[in-house]
Image (spheres, rainbow, N blue to C red):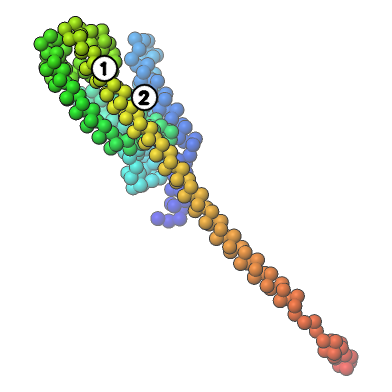
Amino acid sequence: MTSTENGITARLTAFVESAAFRNSIMAVILINALALGLVTLPFDPPWFTDILPLIDQIVIAIFLIELALKLIAYRLRFFTSGWNWFDLIVILVSVVPMAGSFSVLRSLRILRAFRLFSVMPQMRKVVEALLNAIPGMGAVIAVLALMFYVSSVMATKLFAVTNPDRFGTLGDSAFSLFQVMTLEGWAADLALPVMEFHPWAWAFFLVFIVLTSFAILNLFIAIIVDSLQSKHFDADEQRDVEVGEDVVELQSEIAGLRGEIAALTALVQRSLEAPPPDDASASRSSKAPDSSE
C-alpha cells in the first residue's frame, strides 16, 4: 500500500470515528425509529403513507454508505469487532426484499433502533457489562431452577387435590409459583384460595417468596452491578496504563534533555578553563607584519 493510500485510509478512519459522524448516525437511527413507530398509527393520508417509505429508503441508503466507509477504512479489521458484525446483520436484514416468504422480516426493521447500542459508548458499556455478567448468572440460574423444581413438586403434592386448576400438574404448579415470585396478585389469586383448605399454606408461600423474590433476584442484581463496576475499573486501569506509558515517555525525553544539557555545560566549562594566549607569542605575532614590510 502506497503512502497516499495510507493517508487516505487514515483520514477516512478518523472521519468514521469522529464525534460528528457518530452523532449524525445516531440522529438517523432516532429518525428511523420514530418513522417506524409512526407506521403503526391509524393515520393514512396520501402524503403520510408516501413519505414514510421514502424516509425508510433514505435511511437504508445512509446505513449502506456508513457500512461501505467502515469497510474501506478498517478493511479486514472491520470483522474483528462484534459490534460491527451486529451492525452488518441489522443492515443486511433491512435490504432483504420484503415480499413473499421474506415479508415477516418487515417487522424486524425496528431492530435498527438497537444500533444505538453500537453508536453510543455509554449504552455499549452497559450491554457489554450485561454480557460479561452472563457466566456469573449460570450458578444463580441453576439454584433458582432447582428451587422452582423442588417447590413445584411440593406444591403439587400438597395442593393438587384441593386446587387442581392451579396446582394439578407439575407445569401448573411451576407457572403458579412463577406468578407468586413476581408478586402479581399472588395473595388474592393463589394464597387465599389455597388457605381456605390449608390454613398453614401462608408459610409455604412466604418462604418461597423470601427465597426467590428477595434472595435469588437480588443475587442477579448484585452480579450485574459487580459486572458494571468491573467494567468501570477496567476502563480506569486502561487509562492508568495509558497515563503510565505517557509518563515513561516523558521521563525518557527528560533524561535525554538532561544529558544534552550536561554535555553543553561541560563544553562551556572547557572553553572557559582554556588558558589565554602568551604575551610573547602575541607580541611576535604583532611584529611579524612589521618585519615583512
Q: Residue 262: percent from the left, percent from the top?
A: 65, 68
Q: Please tell me whether mark 2 sits on a helix, a strand or a loop.
A: helix
| Marking on residue 206 | 1
Residue 179 can be seen in this image: no
Q: Quadrant location of residue 114? A: top left
Q: Residues within 10 Å of mark 2 (few under 14, many from 20)?
A: some
Q: Which residue is mark 2?
A: 56
From the viewer's side, name the closer residue of 237 and 139: 139
Residue 22 can be seen in this image: yes
Nearer to us of marks 1 and 2 is: 1
Identified at 47% across, 50% down, the residue is: 241
Quarter holding the N terminus?
bottom left
5 relative to 270, above or below:
above
| Amino acid type at mark 1 | Leu
Q: Residue 104: percent from the left, percent from the top?
A: 23, 23
From the viewer's side, name the closer residue of 20 and 193: 193
Quarter holding the C terminus?
bottom right
From the viewer's side, name the closer residue of 53 and 179: 179
On screen, residue 187 versus residue 241, left or right, reads left
| Amino acid type at mark 2 | Asp
Identified at 34% across, 9% down, the residue is: 42
